[in-house]
Image: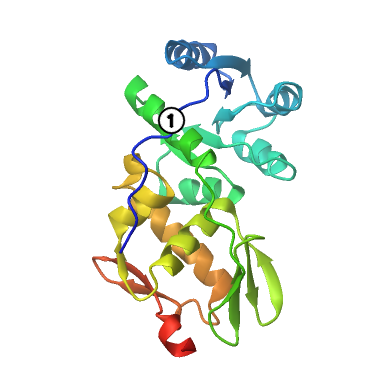
Amino acid sequence: MVEQVPESLEKNAPQLILIVDDEARMRRFIRMNMELEGYQVVEAENGLRALDQIRQHTPDLVIMDVMMPEMDGFEALRLLRENSTVPVILLTVKSDEEDITRGLNLGADDYITKPFSPRILTSRVEAVLRRARWPAPPPRTIMEIDDRLSVDFNRHQVIVDAERIDLRPTEYRLLYYLIQNAGWVVPHETLLAKVWGYEYRDETHYLRLYINYLRKKVEEDPANPKYILTERGVGYRFVDFRKKNK
């Protein structure tokens, strides 16, 4: 059976949010709404300044525009991910999947398209911060799926043909819940709620992208997977390896 998601994880206030946008009006809008929710706020007007602010203040979350002078949000995120796992929400006026995919590939935790309401902003901020505090699955030894694939839950790695491959936090959570329910079909909405949060139950593009990321890391032929199986229109199922290993 699929576990229940904790209804709430209390916010450890005050948390610090860095707002990065070249438009002063947008920074004021976000600052006002975040401060109303009890967050502390610092600002930066471009990617270069954002990196300085992150080194100086170590924020709990970064809300960053994509289109900025001097250094855009994509480049700032790329440099940030070289040595930091701070959660990042990207803002953009574009909504095509190519930009969304690029941001997620670079390590963004979420993506909001302008214009957006204070309610949307607040719910996404809370969801991303909640995932950052999400209780880690209990420590486990290396789990052998078959002769080719093992999962080291302690190190957040998969071992494919004796080669260790690191998993990003979201990939790790997704793989954990799939393996935990091996042999069962886990619906799209359940996976989204478990891995991203209740607010994301309709955001199927996140799930589709990260299933593809995982398949590229664990499958011998990602186009014809044998571990992470698609149940069309319903969800995903991890192969029931436990029966094979008995």
Number of callouts in the render? 1
Q: Which of the pair 37/68 is nearer the observer? A: 37
Q: Give residue 101's position: percent from left, percent from top.
A: 49, 51
Q: x, y percentage for residue 76?
A: 67, 36
Q: Residue at x 26, y 71 (%)?
A: 232
Residue 23 in percent (x, y) is at 54, 16
Q: Secondary structure at mark 1?
A: helix
237, above or below 242, in the image: above
Q: Residue at x 47, y 46 (%)?
A: 100
Q: Is residue 133 visible?
A: yes
Residue on which the image places disc 1 = 126
Amino acid, disc 1:
Glu
Q: Residue 239: give x, y in percent of width and height.
A: 41, 79
- Location of residue 224 (image quadrant): bottom left
191 up-or-down from 108: above or below: below
The picture quadrant where one finds residue 85 is: top right
